[in-house]
Image (cartoon, grey):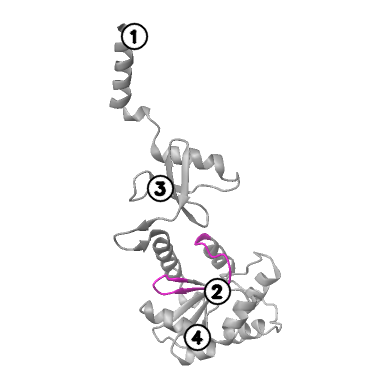
Amino acid sequence: MFRFISVISLACTLIANPASAEDPIENARRNLLKLLPGDIEILGIEESAMENTFIVQLESQELFVYSRGDFLLIGDLYDAARQVHVGEERMAARMAEAVASVSPDQMVVMGPDTGRYVTVFTDTDCVYCQQFHKTVPELQERGLQVRYLMFPRTGIGSPSYHEAVAVWCSEDQGQAMTVAKSGGVVESTECENPVESQYFLGRKIGVRGTPTLVLDNGQVIPGFLTPDELLAEAEMAGN
């Protein structure tokens, strides 16, 4: 009888003292650390609107993780009531905030301010970036300003990086961008420039390739679109 009462007493103590149980967020962190490569850092974990499901912030992406006991489920999270992909909604918000944090005078701007624009993470030697650049005059004629942020895919210190710096430091940045993307040589010039900070900004918010187009509502369009396709997307986004 004593043993039975002791077990009941212990069970009641555990239930009455939630602090003795592992915190759900720490449980999710523990499970993730068992699976993630050692060089990937978990920057933060927060609860989502769905029970036992957490939003995990890594360096350049978010994960939606269902964690319970020793089990994890990683995937997409949808708000069925609003018919919204929660991950895409959050990414759009991050993209819009990140782009808004960069002043236009820190971008290579193609065309006059018409109130309609698209911001493009670009690399001078990317084939699809070069293809997109050929459409810029038509986009300008049709009232869409192009704002370039530098994203040399091969990293800081690479030839693409130095070419991006040369474009930025040119007296006529737009013309230099056209020369670089046409296979020409832009005279190497050094000056104070935002190329490195823009590269790391792109990595932080999940830019993985170029061109990456961002509409002013944060909608992300990876890859090349024709002017008709881009303008249709911009119109649907209210731009």
Depicted 100 relative to depicted 183: above or below: above
Q: 139 or 177, which lies in front?
A: 139
Give the class, few, some or many, for how many residues have Cα within 10 Å of label 2's Cα (few <14, many ≥20). few
Q: Is residue 219 magenta?
A: yes
Q: Earlier in the sequence, mark 1 or mark 3?
A: 1
The answer to whether marks 3 and 2 mark residues whose Cβ atoms lie closer than 8 Å is no
Q: At 47% across and 49% down in the image, what residue appears?
A: 74
Q: Secondary structure at mark 1?
A: helix
Q: Which residue is mark 2?
A: 223
Q: Secondary structure at mark 3?
A: strand
Magenta part of the protein: which range? 204-220
Q: Which residue is mark 3?
A: 54
In the picture provided, is 71 more to the left or to the right than 9?
A: right
Task: Look at label 2 and name its amino acid.
Answer: Gly
Q: At 60% across and 82% down in the image, what residue appears?
A: 131
| Figure label count | 4
Q: At 30% across and 17% down in the image, what residue appears?
A: 8
Q: Which residue is mark 1?
A: 3
Q: Secondary structure at mark 2?
A: loop
Most frequent secondary structure within the magenta stretch: loop
Snapshot quadrant of residue 130? bottom right
Task: Look at label 3 and name its amino acid.
Answer: Phe
Q: Earlier in the sequence, mark 4 or mark 1?
A: 1
Q: 160 or 26, which lies in front?
A: 26
Q: Earlier in the sequence, mark 3 or mark 2?
A: 3
Q: Secondary structure at mark 4?
A: helix
* Residue lying furthest top: 1
Measured from the top left, where is residue 82 in percent x and y?
Answer: 30, 62
Which quadrant would the C terminus be assigned to in this image? bottom left
User: Which of the numbered marks, if any, corresponds to residue 227?
Assistant: 4
